[in-house]
Amino acid sequence: MLQHPPIQNPFRPGAGQRPVYLAGRTHEQDQFRKMLRQDPIAQNAIITGLRGVGKTVLLEELKPLAQSQGWLWTGNDLSESISLTEERLARRIVVDLSALLSPMLIKQEQLPAFGFQSPPSTMQRPIDFHDLWNIYEKTAGLTIDKLKAVLISVWGLIDSAKLSNGVVFAYDEAQNMADHAQHNEYPLSLLIDLFSSLQRSTPCRYLLVLTGLPTLYPKLNEARTYTERMFHIMHLKRLSDDESREAIAEPIRITNSPLTFSGAAIDTIVKMSAGYPYFIQFLGKEVFDAWIGKIHNGEAASVPVGELLEKLDQDFFAARWARATDRQQAFMKVTATLENCEEEFSIQEIVIASKKWLKKPFSASHANQILLDLADKGLVFRTRRGGYSFAVPLMSRFIERQGWSGVDLQGGIK
Ligand SMILES: Nc1ncnc2c1ncn2[C@@H]1O[C@H](COP(=O)(O)OP(=O)(O)O)[C@@H](O)[C@H]1O
Ligand SMILES: [Mg+2]
């Protein structure tokens, strides 16, 4: 019997999973290239947007771009950084820096002479964490003064060795950082102050790139009002229809897949995903897998829409939805009826809609309280302008699929 070679599925749904083809985002890359050419450096970057919109993979894409322009790149994922202290942030920065520099920078060390005859000798070894941390500890003052001293010395070394045009410090999931006034810990403010001060008053070429959910920027702004001038914001949105089509067709083409998607199948995925990259990868993978079972060569002509939505709901939405109480779910069902529910909505709009739909509508203060609770549960977030948005894309479509069962509707509404 003829054996088919295993066919690789070219789609990569999953946080931080590098897509086979990165669609769109050329504007952001151009902007970043411009930022690398700044002299002196005054503008830093924030990459923000909903979960799954492609922040992490864009950040990964910027790294080789920076390197090709002669920049060094360091940084970290701040996912677990809610209780980060200033000292731990300082350590993290110094650890990252020493890991970056140790393969490149050599330190000469005088060894003590043995006996009377032998002259003192020198030894060469790579720079390590302790060399840098020593500078930190020997510097008097606040954490920021100590860190600044380290970063200024490091720039001196990089510059005199002509190692690079600058260093990018890239931090993903930065919305997790927070100041804690009650503990007198201000790591978020420290990070901003550090870069702002280095950029304003030293020749150091350090560029800060922060990536995070839409809560990041308001948070930074609250910590330091001058962030407005310090950051250029790249707000990642859904891909355009053309970009979405490329995001589906290109991985298939690039991998020389014997299985391709018909134009109609691609259109269905574009529509269902609404251009959100995670959904494109998820649906692409599922359609591909469904067809591999049936044919090995040829065109996948249709998309099992019902089954796919079921799977998407289970994999992506259900766990989040289940965090909300019945009353909160009713509240979100009302919200999902708003025309602007996938963008931004106000308390007032929900209050008005609730009068239309519910036997027991929400008062403004109750609505406000529910939104705060839902924000804590990661279902909505407060926008810069003081409105609210759903925290995950296409949430309203999922909510519509849940129907109104279990909700006491206004008389006459079925
Ligand atoms: N521009 C893009 N083109 C195609 N796929 C993308 C693109 N951006 C992101 N993806 C895919 O979307 C998913 C989510 O990307 P990720 O960077 O983790 O999002 P975020 O960091 O914003 O939550 C991944 O599966 C990734 O492969
Ligand atoms: Mg991410």
Image: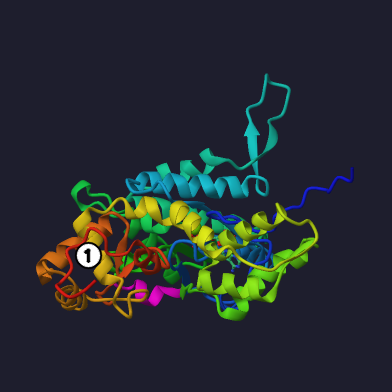
Q: Residue at x 43, y 63 (%)?
A: 195
Between residue 304 and residue 286, name the one nearer to us: 304
The residue range painted magenta reads 225-233
| Residue farthest toward the right in the current orientation of the protein | 1
Q: Is mark 1 within 8 Å of ligand 1?
A: no
Residue 118 image offset from top left, x and y in percent: 73, 24
In the picture, the quarter occupied by the C terminus is: bottom left
> Residue 400 occupies which quadrant of the picture?
bottom left
Q: Was residue 359 drawn as part of the magenta stretch in this picture?
A: no
Q: Residue at x 47, y 67 (%)?
A: 202
Q: Amino acid at mark 1?
A: Phe
Indicate whether 188 appears above or below 106: below
Indicate whether 351 appears above or below 401: below
Residue labelled with disc 1: 331
Residue 260 image offset from top left, x and y in percent: 74, 66
Between residue 12 and residue 395, name the one nearer to us: 395
> Residue 201 occupies which quadrant of the picture?
bottom left
